[in-house]
Each structure stands twice: as structure tokens, then as C-alpha cells.
């Protein structure tokens, strides 16, 4: 087995573990009664960090389908964490905005996740977590999923 073969196997394992970690966090949120699906959470988190956006721009930025984002927005509106506001540059395309309740819920969610992650990673050094983040960002930015090698 070559070094590249081993690296590919290791990175596949990273993807699997990241997926498991993400699903565990999502299930934990659902059990806490937030009623946030993974999609609604992704949209809400994005909108708490940016200005209100139309659904197509959210979908493009998050690399999700417009239909999925629209369903997530609809669920967020029903939950009271998202709302539609007028778009001054486009009469028919509303902007999706995080409500104050949505911003509070997202702040609580991030704080809770950080506490849980820290409790589970006490044995790691700051250098190890920084290296992990650097590796994940590098793989994310340098991987093109729509082209075969």
C-alpha cells in the first residue's frame, strides 16, 4: 500500500467520523426540544452570521438544493426562528432573516455544543485541535467533488 493509498483510507475514515459527530450533535439538538432539523439549523446558523439572504443565495452558499433550503426555511418559519422580509432589490424574491428568537436559539445551541465538545476532547491539546481544523479546511478547500481525478 502506498502512502497515498493510506492517506485516502485515513481521509475516508475522517469523513465517516465527522459525519457521525455531526449526526450525534443534530440528534442531541432534536432531543433537547429545539425542533431544529439539520437543514434548518444550517440555514439559521448561516443567517445569524450574515445579512438576510434570498433562498437561492443561501442554497448556493451552503451548497444545498434550493428545494431543500426552501423546505428548511419553511420549517424555520413555522418554528419561529426564521422570517421572510421584503427584498428592496427584487419584488418577488423575499429575504430570509433570523428572528431574535432564532438568534437566541443559535447562540444557545453553539454554546451547548462547545461545552459538549470540550468535555469530550479534554485530552487534546490546543495544537492538536488547531491541526485538526487546518487539515479539515485544507481537504474542504482543495477537494473538487464534481470531477473525477
Image: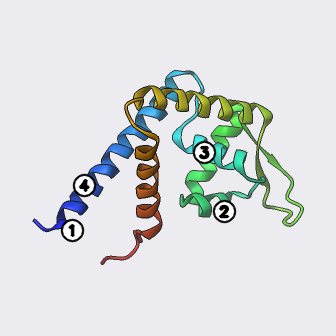
Do labels 1 and 2 touch, CB within 8 Å?
A: no
Label placed on residue 4: 1
Q: Residue furthest left?
A: 1
Q: Residue at x 57, y 27 (%)?
A: 112
What residue do we see at 77% from left, 53% from top?
52
Q: Residues within 10 Å of mark 1 (few under 14, many from 20)?
A: few
Residue that numbered label 3 is attached to: 72
Q: Secondary structure at mark 1?
A: helix
**Viewer-side residue, 59 vs 105:** 105
Tell us which disc is closer to us: 4 or 3: 4
Alpha-carbon distance for marks 1 and 2? 38 Å
Q: Which residue is mark 2?
A: 56
CA distance for labels 3 and 2: 13 Å
Give the residue pinned by disc 4.
10
Q: Is residue 91 left or right of residue 101?
A: right
Query: For this rendering, which residue is in front, 89 or 7?
Result: 7
Give the CA distance from mark 1 to mark 4. 10 Å
Q: Position of residue 35 (x, y in %)?
A: 58, 29
Compared to 116, does 57 lie above or below? below
Amino acid at each position: 500500500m502506498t502512502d497515498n493509498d493510506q492517506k485516502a483510507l485515513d481521509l475516508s475514515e475522517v469523513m465517516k467520523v465527522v459525519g457521525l459527530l455531526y449526526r450525534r450533535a443534530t440528534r442531541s439538538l432534536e432531543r433537547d426540544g429545539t425542533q431544529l432539523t439539520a437543514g434548518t439549523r444550517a440555514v439559521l446558523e448561516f443567517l445569524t452570521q450574515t445579512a438576510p439572504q434570498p433562498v437561492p443565495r443561501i442554497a448556493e452558499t451552503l451548497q444545498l438544493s434550493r428545494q431543500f433550503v426552501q423546505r428548511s426555511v419553511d420549517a424555520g418559519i413555522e418554528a419561529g426562528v426564521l422570517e421572510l422580509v421584503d427584498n428592496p432589490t427584487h419584488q418577488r424574491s423575499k429575504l430570509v432573516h433570523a428572528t431574535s428568537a432564532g438568534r437566541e436559539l443559535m447562540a444557545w445551541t453553539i454554546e451547548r455544543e462547545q461545552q459538549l465538545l470540550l468535555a469530550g476532547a479534554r485530552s487534546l491539546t490546543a495544537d492538536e485541535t488547531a491541526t485538526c481544523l487546518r487539515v479539515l479546511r485544507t481537504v474542504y478547500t482543495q477537494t473538487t467533488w464534481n470531477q473525477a481525478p
